[in-house]
Amino acid sequence: MCSFSLEEEEEEDKHLNLQFRDSKTESDLKPHLNEPKSPLLPPLTEIEQEELEKVPKFKARPLNKKVNLDSIKLPPGNDFGIESDDDDVAVYHDSQLEFDDDIDFGNIIVVDNLPVVPPLKLEKLEGVVRRLYNKLHVRELWMPLDPETNLTPGYCFIEFNTPQEAQTAKEKTHGYSLDKSHILAAYTLDEFERLTDVEEEEEWEAPQTKPYVPCENLQRWLLSQGDQLVVRYGTDTEVCLWDDAGKKTLEPVEKRGCWTESYVQWSPLGTYLVTLDKQGAALWGGADTFSRLMRYQHEMVNRVDFSPGEKYLVTYNYSPEQVEMKVFDVRSGRVMRGFKVCPNVFSIGGVCWARGDEYFAMHNVDTISVYETETFSLIDKKPIKVDNVVGMCWSPTDPIIALFVPGGGDRPGKVALVHIPSKVELRQKNLFGVSGCNMYWQSSGEYLAAKFDRYTYTSTKKKSRCFGFELFRIKEKDIPIEALELDNKNDEVIAFAWEPKGHRFAVIHGDQTRPDVSFYSMKTARVSKLATLKAKQANFLFWSPTGKYIVLAGLNGQLEFFNVDELETMATAEHLMARVIEWDPSGRYVATAVISLVHEMESGFTLWSFNGTLLCRILKDQFFQLAWRPRPPSLLSAEEEEEIAKNLKHYSRKFRTEDRDVSLLLREQVREKRKALQEEWEEWVMQWKSLHQEEKLTRQQLLDGEISDEEEEEIDGFGF
């Protein structure tokens, strides 16, 4: 596509005129001074004169009389050898307007929803569009002007070298937001012609209204009394229901072979199950059986992540050259935004989502890029510039980002809280001599703990390492900060964990082989220590989702079930080489698993009660994965939950009655099963006795009547 201007045409005419004048000689350009003479003809002979007089004479019409051309008509189909200028023009136009069907316009795209601007801003708008498409090898860009309004029509044509480049440009820029009012719509020219090629003769018909078909309730599984979990072993993937501890068995819900090629993952609220394969990711869900709800195309995807509200799905393709990410709308399957970044500058955490799915952020070198999901564009069209930033995490409940910037030389490190979308720094804490920092949010967003590592020098100039905490009270005025140091500053911090929906946290510190476990509370104005457990075989902390109980786990599978309210150990157990420890959403059961990739022998999983009672142990060859199905948050308010907790004894009577009924039902089922087995045995005995009686005569004939059945029994009774 080419564009021309009036100035270029005038310059071209001047250039042609100069060339024409240069081709003339000087004498040719001078005017003639004398009139040209008429040519001399030879005189006519007498015979020619006589023939001329025989020709009929015609009277000439005056020159000033108008001729009505419409009155002149030729017979149809006969032009008398006169070629019509109109036919030439028609043939010329047809030759210009008719194109060969073999010509392909796939290398041209139409970009719609551009701003409508006057000619003075046309150059600026073209520059914006060119900057957007320059990396995609633009060959030509043409933005027309409406002759009636003298404004751009809101679209432009862009030509690329190949149809493949045009298709790539269309995919990458379709839905791109210049601002909140202009979201680009890109189509190839072939698609645009197909969409606009509507014949006038065709009459529009109103679409038929389809009858309403209610959708399947994807939360129906919540009506079951138990909790579901997914296990993956060999080539099979199975979803099971753990209903009651008295049954000590898992009820199968769905089992499929080769359901996934790598792993499976639940959505944060438990609505969907995601499986991965080479072509992309698939979404599954349903009330009774798992049916495929949506498919997301992304080749060689090796990781997926949901937004907290399950509105969006992020797929990742990690490779040594680049990290490719796609953000999908979960329900429609539409690609909302794509990213390609270098692995060296990309944070391993990937995309971090804010609560409510309104914002998400990515950590790059010296920048934090925060996007809003209304238009999927950067907030204020620019990232947050933070030099040397190495860590970030969102608050679980508020649009607040916690950042860590390490120090260097005389410059201290810092932990900062930034509000989004205003980008206002709410609080900052400088940390001197800090070499590393880890940040932990409490699940309700009330507290933030920053654990730092610091190197110090003793009086003998020996370098030593110490650990400490900076505790932020987010919900209080001005966000007060409190420092916490361990009793022994040189103790290494092995693990840290907040109590869910609570005010307590636990710390494992000291020697790796026999560390100590300390519990602290933030309920009072100053942080206070509750207790310290000495010399425990613990390296990991696993709080119950409802708080109060915690599992202390060791590297070799040692388990200690601890009641933090009473500060007492409820039970100790061992699951050798267990590497997976996960509470169910209700906080009543704990699953521990041995993965085949770590330990081939005794692979499988075990279910425990909250107080450490062994309930069920299932062994599986080539066991790879176990995950409980999450539950959505309770619809009860905090006041209603507190009221239920106060009157728990009153509500527990109902559940005790139900448990007793279930127990009686199970006992009755056991009795019926035993009775059925006894009846089956007695029936089998009667069949053999009947057969024995039928063969009595045959036995006597074979024994020649010497020994009868009764005598044989008597002999056997005497021991002969």
Image: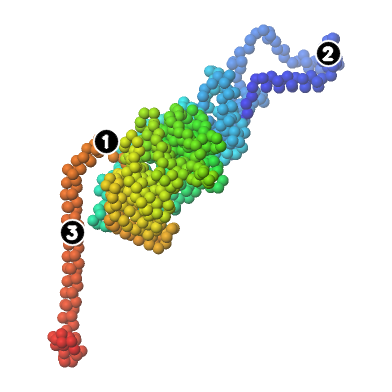
Q: Secondary structure at mark 3?
A: helix
Query: Distance of mark 2 from mark 1, alpha carbons?
Result: 104 Å
Please tell me whether residue 244 is drawn above or below residue 680 in the rendered image. above
The residue under the point 39% across, 31% down is 479
Query: Distance of mark 3 from mark 2, alpha carbons?
Result: 128 Å
Q: Secondary structure at mark 2?
A: loop
Q: Along the polypeptide, which appears first: circle 2 or circle 1?
A: 2
Label 3: which residue? 667
Q: Quadrant of the C terminus?
A: bottom left
Give residue 640's position: percent from left, percent from top.
Answer: 24, 36
Give residue 43's position: percent from left, percent from top.
Answer: 85, 15
Label 1: which residue? 637
Q: Quadrant of the N terminus?
A: top right
Q: Along the polypeptide, which appears first: circle 1 or circle 3?
A: 1
Amino acid type for the residue under numbered disc 2: Lys
The residue under the point 31% across, 52% down is 561
On the question of residue 255 being in view, the answer is no
Label 2: which residue? 30
Camera-side residue of 544 and 144: 544
Camera-side residue of 105 and 414: 414
Between tags 2 and 1, which lies in front? Answer: 1
Is residue 36 shown left or right of residue 347?
A: right
The residue under the point 51% across, 44% down is 458
Query: Dot 2 surroundings within 10 Å: few (below 14), some, or many (20 or more)?
Result: few
Query: Dot 1 surroundings within 10 Å: few (below 14), some, or many (20 or more)?
Result: few
Between tags 3 and 2, which lies in front? Answer: 3
Amino acid type for the residue under numbered disc 1: Ser
Between tags 1 and 3, which lies in front? Answer: 1
The residue under the point 46% across, 44% down is 466
Q: Secondary structure at mark 1?
A: loop
